[in-house]
Image (cartoon, coloured by chain):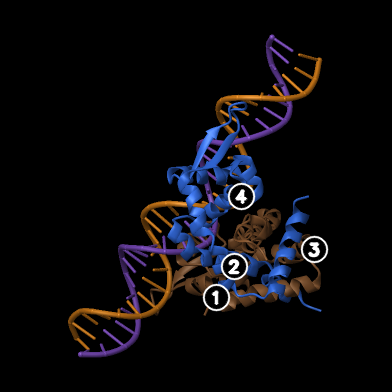
Chain colours: A brown, B blue, C orange, D purple
DNA sequence: TGCAATTATATTGTGTGCAATATAATTGTG
DNA sequence: CACAATTATATTGCACACAATATAATTGCA
């Protein structure tokens, strides 16, 4: 039985390791993403587009659990780097369609091996990966109700 | 045997959920920490100080896996809020000692129940908690070599 | 149809987070 | 003992992340 004092200690926290782990994982991506001159969140945007061909701003926000305050300036930076194009939808001028430029499409080939490298670097067993995935998605599902 | 295309999605389900979960957990803290007028990283600094009474800047950096570029401005904001005091060490003027003010000490009483509330909100089983902690610390240990 | 809600995106402001660099104090070495 | 290396913290610059607010386009309803 832990005292309140004990519970407040950093070493006993559940959330702190996750918070730290998240940063650590992003930093594991850094050397690979540096080569492509993109950040981790930008890589996530590209993954959406590589899968969907095109997407609206709100679709990207929803898929990545980010809001327009984060996404809009990020998309502008990606546009400046000529990875994507932003165009207002003809039949509804509120909607902004995001599409890949040729440069953005080409990056996929260079990025295709990053997941393998990361899995190597993280070095977890299959069981651990499955468990980790199930727990994280469980919490996310619950909190999204 | 998964195609590269699919693996790209698979890893999307390992690293991305952790990244998202981390943000989700921080947002779970927000209502409780808003009452104390502190951010999650500031809460982490306070946890170190509640445990250690006092600490140097570098000790805090090490414990929280953050660097001075993050910590120094954060400590200044916490000093401005009169939660902590910053004093140069007499025998080595390079070192800055961080101590709690009375206001900083008093916050501990109000914060003592937050971990319980979070555990409730997260709603994981004991096994899941233990597993999560062990796996996150495993990766962190490995990457810190 | 007119205009108040709604919707999609953008903007503002604040606080991290980190790489790179700077600064000042201390230590180690010839 | 001088001074180059090291150490501890600070600063700069850039990119998120998110709450709050703004803006412009579209929808819905009296």
Q: Residues within 10 Å of mark 3 (few under 14, many from 20)?
A: some
Q: In which quarter of the image is residue D1?
A: top right
Say few, some or many: other residues with alpha carbon within 10 Å of mark 1 (under 14 / 14 to 19 / 20 or more).
some
**Mark number, residue A143:** 1
The alpha-carbon separation of the residues under discs 3 and 4 comes to 33 Å
Question: To which residue does mark 2 refer?
Answer: B20
* Residue A137 vs residue B138, the one in the foreground: B138
- First-in-chain label (4 vs 2): 2
Q: Is residue A136 above or below residue B78?
A: below
The chain that hosts pointer 3 is A
| Quarter of the image where one finds residue A110 | bottom right
Q: What element carries label 3?
A: loop
Where residue B26 sits: x, y (%)? 55, 63
Residue A85 appears in the figure:
yes
Q: Which residue occupies 50% across, 39% down? A: B85
Mark 2 residue element: helix
x and y, in percent, of residue A18 in the image: 65, 62
Q: Is residue B7 visible?
A: no
What number is the disc on residue A68? none
In the rendered structure, the residue with mark 2 lies on which chain?
Answer: B
The quadrant the N terminus of chain B occupies is bottom right
Real-space Cα distance between discs 3 and 1?
A: 29 Å
The residues bearing labels 2 and 1 have C-alpha atoms spaced at a distance of 11 Å
**Residue A86's x, y, as percent?**
48, 67
| Contact? badges 3 and 4 (CB < 8 Å) | no
Res B51 label:
4
Q: Which mark is residue A123?
A: 3
Element at label 1: helix
């Amino acid at each position: 039985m832990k005292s309140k004092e004990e519970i407040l200690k950093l070493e006993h926290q559940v959330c702190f390791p996750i918070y730290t782990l998240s940063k650590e994982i992003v930093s594991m991506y850094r050397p690979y993403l540096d080569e492509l001159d993109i950040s981790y969140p930008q890589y996530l945007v590209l993954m959406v587009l590589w899968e969907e061909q095109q997407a609206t701003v709100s679709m990207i926000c929803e898929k990545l659990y980010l809001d327009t305050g984060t996404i809009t300036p990020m998309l502008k930076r990606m546009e400046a780097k000529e990875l994507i194009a932003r165009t207002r939808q003809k039949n509804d001028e509120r909607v902004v369609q995001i599409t890949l430029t040729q440069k953005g499409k080409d990056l996929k080939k260079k990025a295709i091996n990053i997941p393998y490298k990361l899995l190597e670097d993280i070095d977890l067993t299959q069981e651990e990966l499955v468990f980790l995935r199930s727990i994280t998605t469980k919490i996310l599902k619950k909190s999204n109700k």
